[in-house]
Amino acid sequence: MASERETIVIIGAGIIGVSTAYFTAKKLAEKYTADKRPRLILLEQCEPGCSASGKSGGFLARHWSDGTDTEKLAQFSYDLHAKLAAELGGADKWGYRAVDTFCAEIDRIPIMPAKQHKSSHFRTEAESVVTSIEVIAPRSRRSSPAAATMEYSLPTTPSEDNMHQNSTHASISVPEIESVKVVEPETVPWLRTNVLTKLRQVGDTANTAQVDPLKLTRALLAEAKARGLEIVRAKVIDVAETGYRPPLIEFPVDNCSRGKTAIDEEFNIVGPSSAPASTSLAADSPVGMQDGWSKPMTNKPYILQLDQGSDIPADKIVVACGAWVTSCLRWEAFREVSASQIPIQGLRVHYLLAKPKYDLPAQAVFAEINGTVYSGEDAIEIYPRPDGSVFVCGEALDDPEMPPHNPFEPIYSKRATSRLKQIVNDVSPALSFDIIQYGLACHLPVHAKGIPVISKVPNTRGLFVAAGHGCWGILNGPATGLSVSELLVDGQPTSLDLSNFRLDRWY
């Protein structure tokens, strides 16, 4: 009977939630026979990879987090990416490949847009923009040869006692200075050499790689579904412990008015009203609810109330909804979790997809543009992909913000998009804007301390949080998913030590 089977629910179908679903489904299939296997459900209010997990660069670096709390996580996950690609055909399915990586210093670009004026150099606080790398990895104040010579330098070692907001995202670093070398401008032939003042190689095919994150997310989702994962499109309104539910106000997302989409058909995603009967509360109780929420007739410790359709009883729940993770603070079962324990917000980053005039080599470029007409310094990240497109990102807002309730709501700034397009056009003659997608943005889930939360909620029977990975979400997604699956199925992590990422570390 359904009541005898454990039910595990994962909230959020980004790279963290999908990786968790994949490894959990795999472990359950290996450990249990089909008739006794716990039910595994993935809830997503929009589409798989609809935010940062489908709209990021997909850059992977094995050693760029060395010296930080995420060092072991990043190294393990980098190797896990290679293993997954070898096992599941990642080169063909999600564009996995090793790349050479460069840091380029670009001299002043003398081109001024027709509608741009000198006075516009002075920007309001709301208009101020910086690159995602600058926000996630502020320059180190530590005096060292690397810090003196590298624009992307090693961050200071975080201290639990004196970490402050101005150094909260120091989780990116480049290799030690001895492994960085200055190379000839012609090494990256698709950059304008006449404005390139210095080019340094900061990674090679042995330690940097790339993926298409949306294709990766959906490929892992397909693998998880083949192993028994159920996918339901719905928004969670509340998670209550059996016996109590307080009143609350919500902003539901209309998931049904859009009708059945191609993604729904591909993954057989069902709406809550059409979910299998075993998903509803009635599956665990022949009489369902009694006296509203005061006396639920179920042996499950938790009940997820959805914005539409039937509620879902569950034994274990993983909250992995990225920049929206603080939604759980309004849920009754998470009443002992404080906002200071998951200080995670969305960092709005703009990006575009360009069509190059010719095929570009497997190279990733972090470009700093000095003395532009826009500001003292701008920076962008450029990632040619195996499918022939080029992903370009930058123009992040200075401060994290709460994302809109509906992830489909447009969040891009026309001004930031125009700036990004202009910079790319000035930096590379190879990128053509005849075929391009722009006016795009997403929210990176950033933690105020610069490291993610991967943890069981203390003093609960089965609540977990996995979020706040910032710009390293794609890199660290597989290792995070594997570790959470070990918590869910085995009761403790065996692949990695998660003590640095516990929920109660700081408060």
Image (tube, rainbow, N blue to C red):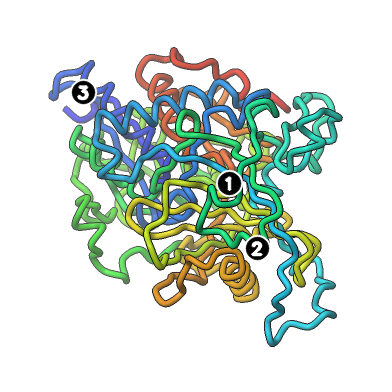
Viewer-side label of 3, 1: 1
Q: Position of residue 466 (x, y in %)?
A: 51, 34
Determine whether 109 is above or below 42 in the image.
below
Q: Residues within 10 Å of mark 1 (few under 14, many from 20)?
A: many
Q: Quadrant of residue 140?
A: top right
Q: CA distance from mark 3 to mark 1?
A: 31 Å
372 relative to 282 in the view: left or right: right
Image quarter of the C terminus? top right
Residue for point 65% across, 63% down: 194
Check residue 29 in the rendering and tell me which mark sits there, or answer none. 3
Labelled pair 2, 1 in contact (Cβ < 8 Å): no
Residue type (three-letter) at the residue carrying disc 2: Asn
Q: Which numbered disc, 3 or 2, marks the residue that appears first in the sequence?
A: 3
Determine whether 293 is above or below 40 in the image.
below
Q: Secondary structure at mark 3?
A: helix
Check residue 445 in the rendering and tell me which mark sits there, or answer none. 1
